[in-house]
Amino acid sequence: MLKFICYPKCTTCQRAKKWLDNNGIKYDLRDIKIDNPTFEELSLWYRVSGLPLRKFFNTSGLLYKSLELKTKLPEMSEDEMLKLLATDGMLVKRPLLIGEDFVLVGFKESEWSARIGK
């Protein structure tokens, strides 16, 4: 079953959830604020996604901005970035949709449709 990791108060996450529900796609929901992804999970998802690690950061979030990560990330190693992401779910771009062999970061309906075939 798919894992849908989101922040329920986020409007993009709400749109993604509605899309999943409207398309009859079953998933396990996980609130990223209550159950933050671990270093191990983030490491795996990063490898499976094929995306640059920076794509996993919620660049529009208040925490990202208050930590001045725009200037700090270029100097950080992947390991340091993953450890930082694992400290607080609000740093992680959402929603995340995780299947056995794919990870989608953020909600783009066309990407999700193409990947899931709906």
Image (tube, rainbow, N blue to C red):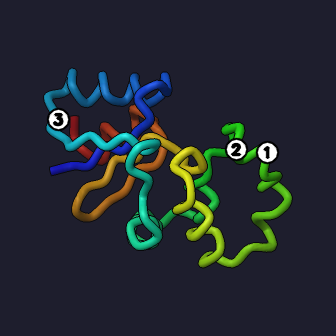
Residue depicted at 39% across the width and 24% down the height: 14
The one nearer the camera, 50 or 15, is: 15
The one nearer the camera, 84 or 51, is: 84
Residue 98 rendering spot, x and y as whole percentages: 31, 53
Residue depicted at 64% across the width and 59% down the height: 54
Q: Given contact means CB atoms under 8 Å apart, are the residues at marks 2 and 1 in contact?
A: yes
Residue depicted at 41% across the width and 29% down the height: 8
Q: Is residue 107 above or below residue 17?
A: below
Gap between marks 1 and 3 measured at Cα: 36 Å
For residue 63, which numbered disc appears in the image? 2
Residue 101 rendering spot, x and y as whole percentages: 26, 64
Q: Is residue 13 above or below residue 63?
A: above
Residue corresponding to mark 1: 66
Mark 1 vs mark 3, foreground winner is: 1
Which residue type does callout 2 highlight? Leu
Looking at marks 2 and 3 on the same chain, the residue that comes earlier in the sequence is marked by: 3
Gap between marks 2 and 3 measured at Cα: 32 Å
Query: SS for tag 3?
Result: loop
Query: Does residue 111 appear left or right of residue 18 in this picture?
Result: right
Q: Is residue 87 above or below residue 110?
A: below
Looking at marks 1 and 3 on the same chain, the residue that comes earlier in the sequence is marked by: 3
Mark 3 Cα-neighbour bin, 10 Å: few <14, some 14–19, many ≥20: few
Gap between marks 2 and 1 measured at Cα: 5 Å
